[in-house]
Every structure is written in C-alpha cells, then in structure tokens.
Amino acid sequence: MNVSSCIKSNVTLETMPEAWGIASAIDIYECDPKKIRDAEYIKSFVVQLCDLIEMKRFGDTQVVHFGEDEKVAGFSMVQLIETSLISAHFANLTNTVYLDVFSCKAYDPEVVREFSQTSFGGSFSRISVTHRL
C-alpha cells in the first residue's frame, strides 16, 4: 500500500519558475530492520539515490548512531549535495525511515519515494512536497 499526499506531479521547477527549490519529506513504514541498522547499506543507498536524481554529492555521507531513549534510537544520515542537502533518521523502535531531500535543482519527488521505499523494504510510505519560494 502506498500513501501519497501533497504532491502534484505536473508542478516542477520548470512549470513553477518562481520556486527556489523543492523540499520532500518522505516517511517509509515497516522497513527491513537489517537495512535500516546497517551504516554501510545506508551510505550505499545515498550514492545510488544521488546518482538516480542526478545530484552531485559534496563530501562523504555522515551516518551516526545515537539515542539513549529507544523511541529515537537509530542511525541519522546527512549528505551535503551541491544544490543543498539530503538527510534521514532511521527509527529502530518502529522500523521507520524519515527522509528529507531539499534541492534548488529539479528532481521528481515520487521517484525518490519509490526508490527509497523499495531500497529499505518498506510496506508503505507518505510524502509531503513543498516548493520553496
């Protein structure tokens, strides 16, 4: 089951030139616990995602595990890109991925959602897209 909200596929930076960038918040539920707990897998995912949406990575992907409270424990990831930032938190307790992609370069948020859900073995996902003006 896929749950998508707040996305209009016909709205892009080309059709909405006054937009400065696109911010996508993607929540992916019931993910594969092994994948979201594997720092190397997460780093590989970031490389593949950046290649897919043609974003140039700036520096290494940072993946850090933290959280004494089980509610928030898990990896967090940050990847600077030439046109802004990709970040995520991987919640161990719920096996949920909270992914954010922000770029002033055009990309298709639905492509990111589908690729990410498949990559982490999620059962369903939600997306919220904001065009930054």
Image: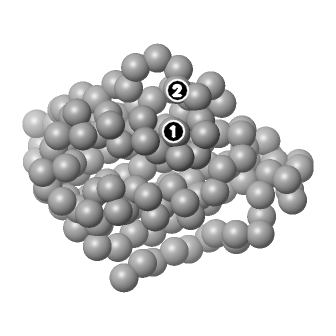
Answer yes or no: is residue 128 visible. no
Q: Position of residue 92 (x, y in %)?
A: 15, 51
Disc 2/disc 1 C-alpha distance (Å): 7 Å
Q: Position of residue 20 (x, y in %)?
A: 79, 41
Answer yes or no: is residue 32 visible. yes
* Residue carrying label 2: 57
Check if mark 2's residue and mark 1's residue have beta carbons within 8 Å: yes
* Residue carrying label 1: 50
Q: Nearer the viewer, residue 33 or 71?
A: 33
Residue at 72 percent of width and 38 percent of height:
104
Residue at 17 percent of width and 40 percent of height:
38
Q: Nearer the viewer, residue 25 or 50?
A: 50
Residue at 51 percent of width and 55 percent of height:
112
Quarter occupied by residue 8: bottom right
**Amino acid residing under circle 2:** Arg
* Mark 1 crowdedness (10 Å alpha carbons): few <14, some 14-19, many ≥20: some
First in sequence, mark 2 or 1: give its number. Answer: 1
